[in-house]
Amino acid sequence: MTIYQNLIAGEWTGAEAVENINPSDTKEVVGLYASGSAADTGNAIAAAKAAFPAWSRSGIWERHVILKKAGDEIMARKDELGALLAREEGKTLPEAIGETIRASQIFEFFAGEALRLAGEVVPSVRPNIGVEITREPLGVIGIITPWNFPIAIPAWKIAPALCYGNTIVFKPAELVPGCSWAIVDILNRAGLPKGVLNLVMGKGSIVGQTMLDSPDLAGITFTGSVGTGKRVAVSSIEHNRKIQLEMGGKNPMVVLDDADLSVAVEAAANSAFFSTGQRCTASSRLIVTEGIHDRFVAAMTEKLKTLNVDHALKTGTHIGPVVDERQLKTDTDYIEIGKKEGAKLAFGGELISRDTPGFYLQPTLFTEATNQMRISREEIFGPVASVIRVKDYEEALAVANDTPFGLSSGIATTSLKHATHFKRNAEAGMVMVNLPTAGVDFHVPFGGRKGSSYGSREQGKYAAEFFTTVKTAYTLA
Ligand code: ADP
């Protein structure tokens, strides 16, 4: 089998490789992917540093053309890349193709942004002096990504980093190197100069840690667990480095008595179980007022009966497998914890076998949960959700906000008054009314509050805040 290698200083390199396994069929090896060393990572950082002066001064048209070419190729290959994504991560083929399209759109967006770079010219408070405010690239950016969005998250970090003139050392998650390799290959062929984008696949404890320890990264943008995010933060203080962290979520979906029941059930089922519940924007706390509670639980249970859990590439699959054995163990451990804590298992909870050996788990719904239980406070990151019964809107809002996280917060209601109040008072970076907590646009800011995020927002024009540094220049006329 050929080895998909790392790209360092414009050269494909690496003989050490690991198998990329399909979670829908663990007999299938998706490919062999290089596993980089600390020395590889050091070389990649040195290459990105050497490439920075020229790339930071590159023309906006050159950047536009490269980003546009990449976006176009991803779109042209959406079915093939979507299938690769579904095979390595396990989300269903339609979800995987949707994510691939989104990656393409992100490159298209930042291709456009490259042509819209601008500053400000303002008068000084002193006579005969002019003031210019400009944005300059930051330097070498470290990009560390998780396994749950194998193409969209790399896209939404790589595209703005390049657009604003930075160079990159990119370390994707061990479980899903395939899509990352593909977009680096596409960008490399689209004409990026050597060393501008370096790919080092491999272990977090080796490649990732070497990046954290380097004084040469001007910024690190990270999406992953709270624990690793904290390590990124602590190491970065020492190096005076800018950081952008997206970590966990424990997103609430409030359902009020006046909700349209079918809208509420569609939003809750999507939020909790699509993409196998493996989205940081997934909702695992369904906070339901008592007048609609029993009808909601009955309708949710009926809905869950209709969802097929199966091979990600099979037509008619609604929920793919869990990503790997470790995550499956976490999910089943939490199901046991929920039972012991006194929540009632209303649906699912069992492993299932299919034609191919994979990590198949039924969508799992608890009822009679409280917001103090561990299943309501800790991120599970699987197809497991609990219903928390509350008296009224005021209690629902208080419970929704009573969490260490603050990424996305949803409400199902037909009341303008409650929807408006919720939008203003939900302690989250993103609020959804009559929509799932997950599923966001590519051209507007993404990010959270409290324990979910740190640093400035990702995506849309707000991305400039992280990927640039502002200069204020004064000139005597
Ligand atoms: P998860 O538990 O969901 O895999 P992680 O935070 O462990 O979340 O992984 C997110 C990304 O962080 C992955 O690319 C992983 O390899 C990387 N990573 C893990 N440990 C470290 C570390 N010590 N330093 C830097 N990156 C790391």
Image (tube, helix red, strand yellow):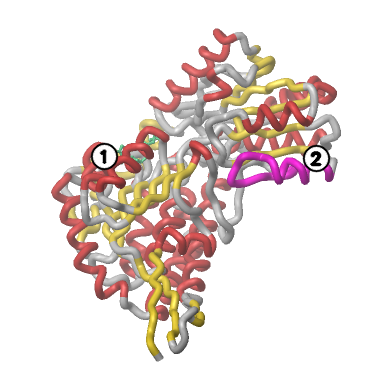
412 relative to 97 in the view: left or right: right
The spot of residue 5 in percent (x, y) is 24, 52
Residue extending farthest to the front is 126
Viewer-nearest residue: 78 or 173: 173
- Tell which of 421 and 41 is nearer to you: 421
- The question of residue 349 being in magenta is answered with no
Camera-nearest label, 1 or 2: 2
Q: Quick one: quadrant of the C terminus?
A: bottom left
Residue 324, visible in the rendered structure: yes
Q: In the image, what residue type sits under mark 1?
A: Lys
Q: Percent from the top left, x then y, of residue 192?
A: 31, 70
Q: Position of residue 166 (x, y in %)?
A: 33, 65
x 52%, y 38%: residue: 450
In this view, the residue farthest toward the left is: 39
Report which residue position mark 2 lands on. 418
Magenta part of the protein: which range?
A: 416-434
Q: Which of 75 and 130 is in front in this view?
A: 130
Where disc 2 sits, the SS reads helix
Q: In the figure, 453 relative to 126: above or below?
A: above
Does mark 2's beta carbon lie closer than 8 Å to ligand 1? no
Cβ atoms under marks 1 and 2 closer than 8 Å? no
Residue carrying label 1: 203
